[in-house]
Amino acid sequence: MNKEQTKKTGPRIPRKITPQRLRNIALYYLERYSASSDSVRQVLRRRIFKASRHHEFDIEEAHGWVEEVIASFTELGYLDDKNYAETKIRSLISRGKSFRYAKGYLMQKGLDPELITQAIEPYLEDEEDHELESCRRLARKKSIGPFRDEEDRQEYFQKDLAKLIRAGFSYATAKQVMEMD
C-alpha cells in the first residue's frame, strides 16, 4: 500500500475541547483578527458545538471555560472592547460610512450600547461635518453625484441620492453632497 491509499477521506473530526485548547483557539483567532469579546465568545462556542457532535464532555463546563478565557484575555489586554469600538468607528467613518451604519455594525459585534456611544462621542461635536465628509467620501468612492461625469449627473441624480440614503446618511446630508460642485 502506498501513501495515497492510506490517507483518510471525508470531513475532519475536531479535537476534544479542553481549557487549553480553547485558549489556543482564541489566541490564534486574535492573531488574525481584531475582535470584540463577544466575537471571540461566538467563535469558541461554535468550536464547542462542533466538537460536541464527536466527543462526550460537559458542554456547560466548556461554556464556563469560555468565560474564563474571555476574562483572562481581557485582564491581559488581549481583548479590549473600548479600544476595539474606537478603532472600528474611526475606520468605518474614514471609509465613508455613516454614524448610523457604524452604530449598527458595532451592535452586531455584541458591544455594549454605552460603549458605542462613548466611542462615537468625539465625532459628535462636529457631527454634521463628519457626516458630510463621510458622505462625500462615499460619493467619491462610488463615483456618484458630484464625482460623476457632468452629462450623466442630472440623469442619475435620484438614483445616486437614494444610494447615499441607503448607506445611512440623512436626506439633508445626501442632498447637500449631491448638490456640491
Image: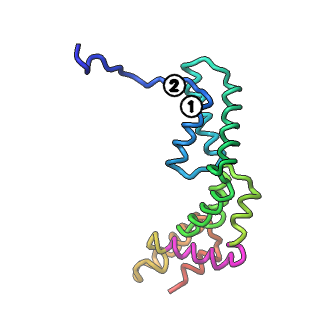
- On the question of residue 109 being in view, the answer is no
Q: Find the magenta span and give its range.
A: 123-139
Numbered circle sitting on residue 21: 1
> Between marks 1 and 2, how big is the CA–CA gap?
9 Å
Q: What amino acid type should be assigned to the residue bearing mark 2? A: Arg
| Residue in the picture at 25% in, 20% down | 3
- Looking at the picture, which amino acid does disc 1 mark? Arg
Asked if residue 71 shows in the view, the reply is: yes
Placement of 39 over or under 95, stated as above or below: above
Q: Main secondary structure of the magenta part?
A: helix
Residue located 55% across and 37% down the image: 24
Among the 4 quarters of the image, the one containing residue 70: top right
Please tell me how crowded label 1 is: few (under 14), some (14-19), or many (20+) other residues with Cα within 10 Å.
Answer: few
Task: Tell me what residue is drawn at x 56 percent, y 64 percent.
Answer: 91
Q: Secondary structure at mark 1?
A: helix
| Labels 1 & 2 near each other (Cβ < 8 A) | yes
Res. 15 mark: 2
